[in-house]
Amino acid sequence: MAIKQKTSSIIEQTEKHGARNYHPLPIVISKAEGVWVEDPEGNRYVDMLSAYSALNQGHRHPKIVQALKDQADKVTLTSRAFHNDQLGIFYDKVSNLTGKDLVLPMNTGAEAVETAVKAARRWAYHRKGVEKNRAEIIGCHGNFHGRTMTAVSLAEGENDTSGFGPMLPGIKTIPYGDAEALKQAITPETAAFLFEPIQGEGGVVMPPEGFLREAQQICRDNNVLFIADEIQTGLCRTGHTFACDWEDVVPDMYILGKALGGGVFPISCVAADEDVLGVFDPGSHGSTFGGNPLGAAVAVAALEVLEEEKLADRSHRLGEYFRDRLRKIENDKIKEIRGKGLFIGVELTVPARSYCEQLKEEGLLCKETRENVIRFAPPLIISEEDLDWALNKIDKVLSK
Ligand SMILES: Cc1ncc(COP(=O)(O)O)c(CNc2cccc(C(=O)O)c2)c1O
């Protein structure tokens, strides 16, 4: 589809004063519903990216939008100087979902990661007895935990880190999935091991089977917090409530975001037991919008949709079907098909961008990650009919 006048003038306007920290595909989305989005010229596309898994419930899910509208007519922001009548309901929901005593609400995923690292450091000093300012955090090569300085200090990519130094001290990384390396990296000062159960931005990379269980045991043996960043993999994306569930592993702390807000409002949180999140006392952490009643009401509705529509089972079932269909595609440039549930990566032996551009021309939106991986992550509500429509387009483009 050639770029039409409205789209090109909108892109031109966007690029006039916008900082150039993204390189989006040349498409403008002006309407969206369910798994379908529309450009200003009325061209429709099936969304196979879901805003990097922030749209597990689909675009503008009626129940979630209604929760936003209802709450917007009551109260949207109180600050935490006062209570509001939605936050306790949110806390109950997340506590029941995670099995954790305490929940700390923030807004973006990166803020929740920052919260997790602050909690881990203070836990190390107050509970583990690590010497002041000596606490260490262990992350994984190929990780992505956001764009704030702690997250960037954990990253390694040139583009993620260059020009942003000095990095936060007390951070080291190990090869992803290497339990022995984790064991060797731990010192008496180690506060936490921070990991993604499946690395999203790393290219939908899964650790060896059993790694999560082994790593958790190593952390337990060394009194190190086992912290799961489930911002992208959580909330039914991989076919279970949490990706950690695939190995029946319950982390010491969950970090949640993205689909927690149902693709309607930014909300994130960390959930952990009293001995970890109890380290925060009044005035030691927070955020202006953290715990606002609008986000809380939206998140409760977003979590209810996951349960009511059984989106974990759907993700698992449709993800198996998706990968089966992909495996039938004849193309010697396909190096590996991987993922769990509707969290799928197709690794190619060549850059993936041109395939994403061809798929866009066919009416399917997806994005490359790590240059040669096409990530497919549709909203979990996708119908079998729409999935088959998308798979026929993928078959057509990838079979060339
Ligand atoms: C595993 C993981 N952890 C933390 C974050 C940070 O969340 P926020 O973006 O809400 O601060 C992510 C985010 N994941 C993600 C994926 C792709 C692009 C971008 C982007 O910054 O445009 C972010 C993520 O995928």
Image (tube, grey):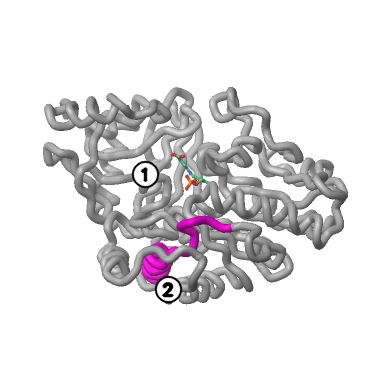
From this viewpoint, is residue 339 visible? Answer: yes
Instruction: Specify whether residue 300 is painted magenta.
Output: yes
Position of the N terminus by quadrant = top left
Q: Which residue is mark 2?
A: 86
Q: CA distance from mark 2 to mark 1?
A: 30 Å
For label 2, the crowd category at 10 Å Cα-Cα, with few meaning under 14, some 14 to 19 and many 20 or more, is: many
- Left-right relation of 287 to 354: right
Instruction: Specify whether residue 152 is painted magenta.
Output: no
- Left-right relation of 99 to 182: left
| Nearer-the-camera pick, 184 or 207 | 184
Q: Residue at x 38, y 69 (%)?
A: 297
Q: Please say if 284 is above or below 304.
A: above
Q: Residue at x 56, y 72 (%)?
A: 95
Q: Residue at x 72, y 50 (%)?
A: 193
Q: Which residue is mark 1?
A: 49
The spot of residue 14 in percent (x, y) is 27, 30
From this viewpoint, is residue 310 visible? Answer: no
Question: As shown in the figure, which amino acid type bears the numbered disc 2?
Answer: Gln
The spot of residue 48 in percent (x, y) is 34, 45
- Judged from the image, the secondary structure of the residue bearing numbered disc 2 is loop
What segment is highlighted magenta in the picture? 286-304
The spot of residue 342 in percent (x, y) is 42, 52
Tell which circle, 2 or 1, labels the residue nearer the N-terminal end: 1
Position of the C terminus by quadrant = top left
Q: Tell me the mark number nearer the camera, choosing from 2 and 1.
A: 2
Toward which corner of the image does residue 12 lie, by quadrant?
top left
